[in-house]
Image (tube, helix red, strand yellow):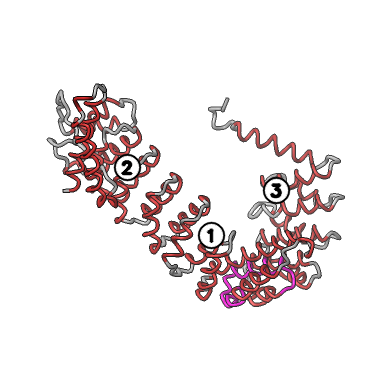
């Protein structure tokens, strides 16, 4: 049971302290893998500093390396000076793995006093140590090192090139833009000439993975540095390079490049729901207005997940053109959760102008839609603008009567009392106009649908005498109702 005394530790704190104690104990166990896991976990938890400092003297290099990595998570703590001094000692460890980990953590700690010691490792023969030094120096924030760190984009090791790409991005060293672009093009050519038969190449998967990781970081850096000249190549990658298309679009959006409607339509029609959702959220994040025509089309997508993402996009991008279809979704979308989302979107898109729609949704069968409608009417409409003889007050009163435990009910009752509302025995609910019955972009199909319904109705009426079906009157009545609504909509 959770303690109600604020001076007592919570259950969560007790569990955390118990885990810390267990991991500290594990650092003294004989099993090497257990000591490694304990060091990593303590670093992630930012706990057990003294135990991790002691672990830097462990007999096994993997434990010392894990301790060095873990200590990189303790920035701005009271032991920071001691941690940095210990890591500076660890970079001279006989194990290259420990040296690499210590260099990495000094960068994470922004230990600027370690600059000269780390710079010495730029000439090391081990590419992993060189890569760690390049990235750490960038994290230290020394802008004057931009040109030197960018030179490692020409290093023989793809790992070092990857860290150099990250470094120039961190330092925002824009003069490296063309080098990044040239290297990206070169890596695409390298992937094309890799032998297709595994027997003809060494470690094929590793080679592919290295190039993919390098391309990944190159594209990210190009986007971060907003290299406008990269747009044609990024567009080509977005069209052709599976696995990199989303990153390419992200970079294109971040640099503000114009993408052809055909490209956007093709990407947003990709079979991968994950990719499409990612692209939609990306365009929303960057408020990429040129994508709005394609995003509007996705409001009609069969996948509820895609419709939801598109609805979020047009809402956050304040797309008033989408309002008509969003209204229709609030009334008729087949997914109940999207109807709720559409109702909220209407409130965000239309503000006070959404009141007429919410009056129609105030008694909706979907409780959450009903609640959003009532909340809008209650909080978004100025009291001075309320028509005491209109439908709003009866709607609020009816909600308070049917949902007495809702947290909005006290405010509703205060408003009704303030306006001296006297409920009638019979409340006339506004009827939904025919305009909301049909998706707005499909109204040109109404004449065809009307013709079919009228022909169906005439067929039933002509054969009425020969029918004994008990559902016949209901069917003809429903057809008459639909025909009347559609006729009004068409007019």
Q: Which comes before the other along the chain, label 3 or label 2? A: 3
Task: Identify the residue at horizontal 50%, vertical 72% (top origin).
Answer: 231
Query: Which residue, given by chain and number where applicable, does mark 1 sit on?
Result: 246
Image position, residue 469 (x, y; %): 26, 23
Q: Which residues are magenta?
A: 155-180
Which of the 4 image quadrants contains residue 407?
top left
What's the distance in space between the residues labelled 1 and 2, CA to CA? Answer: 31 Å
In the image, what residue occupies the spot 77% across and 69% down? 121
Q: Residues within 10 Å of mark 3 (few under 14, many from 20)?
A: many
Nearer to the camera, 269 or 276: 269
Q: Is residue 437 left or right of residue 82?
A: left
Report the side of 207 relative to 482 (left or right). Answer: right
Dot 2: few (<14), some (14–19), or many (≥20) neighbours within 10 Å? Answer: many
Callout 3: SS: helix
State the CA–CA distance, disc 3 to disc 2.
48 Å
Q: Does 173 lie within the magenta span?
A: yes
Label placed on residue 369: none
Q: Is residue 247 magenta?
A: no
- According to the picture, the residue beneath numbered tag 2 turns out to be 330
Residue bearing the label numbered 3: 43
Residue 53 pos. (x, y %): 77, 50
Q: Main secondary structure of the magenta part?
A: helix
| Label 2 element class | helix
Residues at marks 1 and 3, CA–CA distance in whole angstroms: 32 Å
> Where does the image place residue 194, in percent across and percent down from the top left?
71, 67
Q: Mark 1 or 2 closer to N-term?
A: 1
Query: In the shown orientation, is residue 73 left or right of residue 363?
Result: right
- Nearest to the eye among marks 1 and 3: give it: 1
Q: Which mark sits nearer the N-terminus, 1 or 3?
A: 3
Mark 3 or 2, closer to the camera = 2
- Where is residue 357? Give x, y as percent: 24, 43
The image quadrant of residue 191 is bottom right
């Amino acid at each position: 049971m959770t303690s109600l005394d604020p001076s007592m530790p919570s259950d969560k704190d007790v569990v955390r302290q118990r885990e810390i104690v267990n991991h500290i104990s594990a650092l003294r166990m004989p099993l090497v893998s257990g000591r490694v896991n304990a060091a990593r976990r303590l670093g992630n938890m930012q706990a057990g500093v003294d135990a991790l400092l002691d672990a830097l003297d462990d007999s096994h290099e993997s434990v010392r390396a894990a301790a060095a990595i873990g200590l990189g998570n303790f920035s701005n703590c009271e032991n920071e000076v001691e941690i940095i001094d210990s890591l500076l000692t660890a970079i001279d460890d006989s194990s290259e793995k420990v040296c690499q980990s210590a260099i990495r953590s000094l960068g994470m700690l922004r230990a600027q006093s370690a600059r000269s010691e780390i710079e010495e490792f730029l000439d090391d023969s081990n590419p992993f140590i060189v890569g760690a030094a390049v990235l750490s120096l960038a994290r230290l924030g020394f802008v004057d090192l931009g040109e030197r760190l960018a030179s490692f984009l020409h290093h023989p090791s793809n790992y070092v090139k990857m860290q150099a790409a990250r470094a120039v991005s961190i330092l925002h060293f824009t003069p490296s833009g063309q080098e990044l672009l040239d290297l990206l093009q070169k890596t695409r050519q390298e992937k094309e000439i890799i032998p297709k038969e595994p027997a003809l190449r060494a470690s094929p998967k590793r080679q592919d993975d290295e190039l993919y990781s390098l391309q990944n970081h190159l594209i990210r850096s190009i986007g971060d540095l907003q290299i406008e000249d990269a747009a044609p190549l990024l567009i080509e990658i977005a069209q052709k390079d599976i696995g990199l298309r989303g990153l390419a679009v992200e970079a294109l959006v971040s640099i503000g490049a114009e993408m052809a409607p055909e490209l956007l339509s093709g990407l947003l029609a990709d079979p991968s729901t994950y990719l499409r959702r990612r692209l939609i959220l990306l365009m929303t994040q960057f408020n990429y207005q040129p994508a709005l025509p394609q995003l509007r089309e996705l409001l009609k997508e069969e996948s509820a997940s895609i419709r939801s993402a598109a609805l979020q996009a047009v809402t956050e991008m304040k797309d008033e053109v989408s309002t008509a279809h969003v209204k229709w979704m609030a009334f008729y979308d087949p997914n109940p959760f999207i109807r709720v989302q559409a109702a909220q979107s209407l409130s965000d898109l239309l503000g006070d102008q959404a009141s007429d729609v919410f009056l129609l949704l105030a008694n909706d069968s979907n409780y959450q839609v009903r609640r959003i409608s009532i909340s809008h009417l209650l909080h978004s409409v100025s009291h001075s603008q309320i028509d005491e003889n209109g439908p709003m007050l009866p709607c609020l009163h009816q909600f308070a009567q049917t949902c007495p435990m809702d947290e909005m009910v006290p405010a509703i009752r205060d408003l009704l009392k303030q306006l001296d509302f006297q409920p009638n025995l019979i409340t006339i609910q506004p009827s939904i106009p025919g305009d909301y019955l049909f998706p707005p972009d499909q109204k040109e199909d109404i004449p065809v649908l009307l013709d079919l319904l009228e022909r169906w109705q005439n067929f039933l009426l002509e054969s009425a005498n020969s029918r004994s079906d008990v559902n016949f009157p209901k069917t003809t009545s429903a057809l008459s109702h639909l025909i009347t609504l559609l006729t009004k909509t068409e007019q």
